[in-house]
């Protein structure tokens, strides 16, 4: 599972059936404190109604596909949770 911040949305007029009703969001990975860890953004299927600027939990690979209906879909990243707070080691910030 990864931490990420929502940068914006991706508009797609056509989606595979398993993605219908879900938005595609542009994300940037972060560490537990919310500091960006990669300059390269990526797209994920939004399963939790995240908003721009929000911190989220993301699963990648096979876990992303099985989070959606029809586990044979081609998703390689899915937002599965909203981050309210992070406590413990490495969470400063």
Image (cartoon, helix red, strand yellow):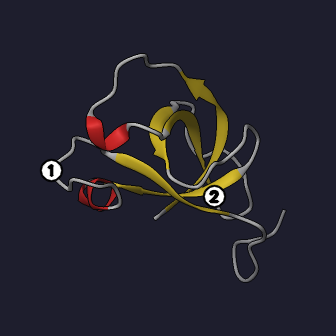
Residue farthest toward the bottom in the current orientation of the protein: 88
**Disc 1 marks which residue?**
72
Name the foreground residue: 30 vs 14: 14
Q: Residue at x 76, y 80 (%)?
A: 87
Q: Residue at x 66, y 48 (%)?
A: 50
Picture quarter with the N terminus: bottom left
Quadrant of residue 93 within the rendered picture: bottom right
The image shows residue 64, relative to residue 13, as above or below, that is below
- Position of residue 47 measured from the top left corner of the image (x, y, whole percent): 51, 52
Q: Is residue 31 left or right of residue 92?
A: left
Counting other residues with Cα less than 10 Å from the Cα at mark 1, is it few (<14), some (14-19), or many (20 or more)?
A: few
Name the foreground residue: 6 vs 40: 6
The image shows residue 11, relative to residue 25, as above or below, that is above
Quadrant of residue 9 within the rendered picture: top right
Q: Residue at x 28, y 37 (%)?
A: 17
Marks 2/1: CA–CA distance: 30 Å
Q: Residue at x 42, y 16 (%)?
A: 13
Q: Is residue 80 left or right of residue 30?
A: left
Name the foreground residue: 62 vs 50: 50
- Position of residue 6 measured from the top left corner of the image (x, y, whole percent): 65, 40
Q: Which mark is residue 31?
A: 2
The image shows residue 18, relative to residue 41, as above or below, that is below
Residue farthest toward the right in the current orientation of the protein: 93
- Position of residue 3 measured from the top left corner of the image (x, y, whole percent): 58, 58
Q: Is residue 14 left or right of residue 83?
A: left
The image shows residue 88, relative to residue 11, as above or below, that is below
Q: Is residue 62 left or right of residue 67?
A: left
- Position of residue 79 measured from the top left corner of the image (x, y, whole percent): 51, 53
């Amino acid at each position: 599972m990864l931490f990420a911040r929502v940068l914006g949305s991706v508009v797609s007029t056509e989606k595979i059936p398993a993605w219908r009703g879900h938005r595609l969001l542009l994300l940037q990975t972060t560490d537990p404190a919310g500091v960006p860890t990669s300059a390269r953004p990526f797209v994920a299927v939004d399963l939790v109604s995240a908003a721009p600027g929000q911190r989220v939990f993301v699963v990648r690979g096979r876990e992303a596909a099985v989070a959606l209906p029809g586990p044979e879909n081609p998703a390689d990243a899915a937002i599965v949770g909203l981050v309210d707070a992070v406590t413990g080691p490495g969470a400063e910030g």
